């Protein structure tokens, strides 16, 4: 069983990787951050197996390891190398303003407005507040980034943040549902990577602002 201190450490890794996704300058850094974040999720899920004894949780953890922590970053890195795009596009907000927004969202998640949510399990209220912060900051990644790859990773990071919130809130989900979600993510990843390849070949960039001139 993982101690509360280690759980806090793993959640801190998840939170910091979400923050990093907002300020990373290179696509390969984004892929690495997502892989590290997913590995922390895997450890938390496998810990649920040791706490509950449900073999299904171990199975879900192993599938998560393969799809999220190994295959997804590997697909992103191969896409980056194949299309020779190394640098990520900019954000709508510059780095200082992005950090201000991150601070504001973190404060909002810890505010009394969300006290009923983060106090679902009172002994985990600090962990739930940090997980809720990660959810908000993942949404910022999706909104603030101009690059298609970063936006896709932002969506995946949002899903990871919701998973970790559910873990600390004690919200149980069936193994079949979680496996189904992982399968959907895997198929979605393949479609997204094909789409990004076509986008880059056509526009020579993954900056979504380059498509502003498109007409219906």
Image (cartoon, rainbow, N blue to C red):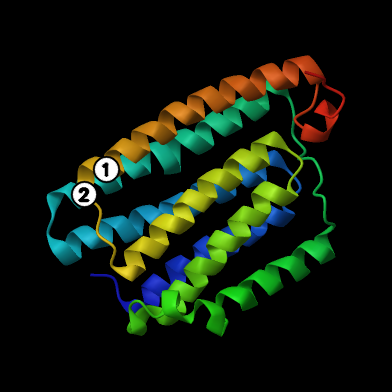
Under circle 2, the secondary element is loop
Percent of width and height locating residue 141: 66, 52
Instruction: Report the front residue among 135 and 29.
Output: 135
Q: Secondary structure at mark 1?
A: helix
Query: Can residue 21 be seen here?
Result: no
Q: In this orientation, does residue 19 appear?
A: yes
Mark 2 is surrounded, within 10 Å at the Cα level, by few (under 14), some (14 to 19) or many (20 or more) other residues, namely few
Q: Nearer the viewer, residue 188 or 73?
A: 188
Q: Which residue is mark 2?
A: 174
Spatial separation of the CA atoms under disc 1 and disc 2: 5 Å
* Pointers 1 and 2 in contact (C-beta within 8 Å): yes
Q: Looking at the image, which residue is at 77% across and 41% down?
A: 146
Q: Residues within 10 Å of mark 1 (few under 14, many from 20)?
A: few
Q: Specify the quadrant that holds the C terminus.
A: top right
Please give the residue where the numbered disc 1 appears in the rendered image. Answer: 177
Name which residue lies at 36% across and 44% down. 65
Establish if 28 lies above or below 104. Answer: above
- Report the residue at 35% width, 76% height from top: 120
Point out the residue furthest to the front here.
216
């Amino acid at each position: 069983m993982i101690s509360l201190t280690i759980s806090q450490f793993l959640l801190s890794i998840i939170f910091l990787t979400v923050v990093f996704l907002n300020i990373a300058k290179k696509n390969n850094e984004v892929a690495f951050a997502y892989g590290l974040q997913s590995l922390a999720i895997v450890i938390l899920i496998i810990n649920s197996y040791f706490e509950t004894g449900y073999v299904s949780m171990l199975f879900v953890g192993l599938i998560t390891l393969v799809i999220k922590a190994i295959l997804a970053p590997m697909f992103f890195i191969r896409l980056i190398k194949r299309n020779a795009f190394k640098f990520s596009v900019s954000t709508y907000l510059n780095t200082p303003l992005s950090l201000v927004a991150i601070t504001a969202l973190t404060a909002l998640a810890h505010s009394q407005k969300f006290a009923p949510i983060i106090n679902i399990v009172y002994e985990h209220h600090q962990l739930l507040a940090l997980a809720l912060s990660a959810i908000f900051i993942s949404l910022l990644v999706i909104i603030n980034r101009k690059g298609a790859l970063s936006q896709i990773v932002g969506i995946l990071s949002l899903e990871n943040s919701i998973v970790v919130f559910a873990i600390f809130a004690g919200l149980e989900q069936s193994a079949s549902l979680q496996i189904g979600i992982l399968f959907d993510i895997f198929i979605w990843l393949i479609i997204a990577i094909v789409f990004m390849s076509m986008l880059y070949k056509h526009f020579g960039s993954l900056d979504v602002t380059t498509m502003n001139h498109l007409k219906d």
